[in-house]
Amino acid sequence: MERMKRIPEPMLEIADLSVRFAGKQVLESVNLDLYPGELVMAIGPSGSGKTTLLRAVNRLNEAYPHCNTRGQVRIRLADRWWDIYAPSTPLAELRLRVGMVFQHPNPLPFSIYKNVALPLRISLGMNPKETLLRVQRALEAVQLWSEVKDRLHDSALTLSGGQQQRLCLARVLALEPALLLLDEPTASLDFKATRHIEALFQTLKQRYPILAVTHNPGQMRRLADRVMVLQDGRCVAAMSRPEIEDPEHSRRVMEAFF
Amino acid sequence: MRPTANRRTSDLATTIFCWTAAVLTMLAVLAVMGFLLYRGAGTLGPNLFFGETHWWEAVRGVRPVFDGLWSALAGTALLVLLSCLLAVPTGIAGGIYLSEYGSRRFRAVAGFAVDLMAGIPSIVMGLFGFSLIVVLRHTFVPRAKTGLLLAAVCIALLVLPYLVRTTQNALAGLPSHLRLLGPSLGFTPWQNIRHVLLPSAGRGILSGVILAMGRAAEDTAVILLTGAVAQAFLPRSLYDKFEALPFRIYYMAAEHRTAAELDQAFGTALVLLMLTGTLFGLAFAAQRTMEKRWKG
């Protein structure tokens, strides 16, 4: 109720979403609203459809053959609702506004600078001066600037795993997205790098609503404002922040579905 | 106990076999080079290239070179350049299409056609070029004759399947996380290919280009039927006859009367090797420059 007063409209609306790959049902009738300022997490075992849910939002599922998506995904950009699957929606522009961080750090085999600058130049057509400013701002936002400012033209592959993942996050933030999709972004990182990135997400969610997936209950407890539990492509349970914080309750839910 | 011992034996046997194979390959290369050097190195010199003609006059093409390989060297270099100019962009584009755009069905059909084309013996390709000229003569272009352009087209057809396949495989071998990255950053399919996939697959594509160049430089059967002649002149136009190194090696070796003449053939072979080596070096340097620019 309180949220309704403060924030009247969601940023993202997923309604009755079903996805099939070559006839195999991967997601079935999933519903979700994502509001500004919150981090919603989908949790579930491997193969429960978490990644497919994220990729349904920026239509990356279509990169795979025989994908069939039904239902509605709508996003609110500059007070206008866009149906993501409408034929008239410009796909490349839409993907620009929906930033995605992948499970494994995937820097391009280019320099650190170019990793962040390339999409600015290609997708936004920015000039070199603006680009430089944007790159610096983005690297500062992920607390990487001080670590790499003297070696911006070294290969991005020389960075550690945690730094690479922060670079990938910076690459997304530089494009100034409307919301963030995080696909188990700390799955391949060690404890320290994980905590560093999690702290970043805590601050970032004030600016960007975040839809994340994880299979790690600890991370869910630390980060999530709301949780949806996925199993075999269906949403089988949901938890609010007080329920997540109640160890007894969250343990019961987790045990029931894992 | 037994199985472990068995496994260890088979492991050892495989290692030895692979090691031997690698060493034998190296030895074979060294033996060929060594023999060529032994027989041909002595003939290397301005005389082998330009005979009695002054080099500057030969290079400018104002005077014929009667017993030098200059016109053959120039002919082969022109042939390789021209056929690569035709085949490399087409082949890479074809590979991109097959890997990135074509439907599964089309990919299977076109892939089969490409494999079929790779299997065509070069003499058949030469015959094709020859018949093409015959047909043209009787229809639209009565004055058509064999020459540099026709040979380059036929060689381009000969090397095209290698280029298509290596490009396709280099692109298809890229990990899927790289493939999804571009679209997730708002790149159009072509931007993704141009800025993410092609740079990442650059080295694989280069190996196709090198293979194609080597094949274009060494092939004799195609040019035999499409315009190569033993002559002392440089080709004056794209439609002119030309001389080529492999062809020169062939007729020198086939028609030699003295050991010295045969040594000249070995010297020519050495020059052909050096030419292809230089071309590989150029291709490699071009790829490195592009890579540097891409990575900057």
Image: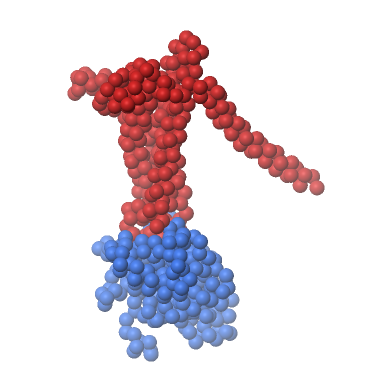
User: Relative to B293, is B112 above or below?
Assistant: above
Chain for colour blue: A
Task: Examine the image and state in which quarter residue B6 appears.
Answer: top right
Residue A212: x and y in percent read 45, 72
Q: Is residue A234 visible?
A: no
Q: Quadrant of the N terminus of chain A?
A: bottom left
> Which residue is at 42% across, 31% downward?
B275
- Is B183 placed left or right of A193 in the picture? left
Colour of chain B in the image: red
User: Relative to B59, is B187 above or below?
Assistant: below
Q: Nearer the viewer, residue A198 or B227?
A: B227
> Which residue is at 38% across, 26% downward?
B73
Label tally: 0
Task: Examine the image and state in which quarter residue B191 appears.
Answer: bottom left
Colour mode of the rendering: by chain
User: Relative to A96, is B215 above or below?
Assistant: above
Residue B197: x and y in percent read 40, 52
> Which residue is at 34% across, 71% downward?
A133
Q: Is residue B89 visible?
A: yes
Task: Examine the image and state in which quarter residue A34 appears.
Answer: bottom left
- Is A188 placed left or right of B228 in the picture? right
Residue A18: x and y in percent read 40, 65
> Which residue is at 45% across, 45% downward?
B204
Q: Nearer the viewer, residue B6 or B268?
A: B268
Q: Residue furthest top?
A: B257
Residue B149: x and y in percent read 29, 28
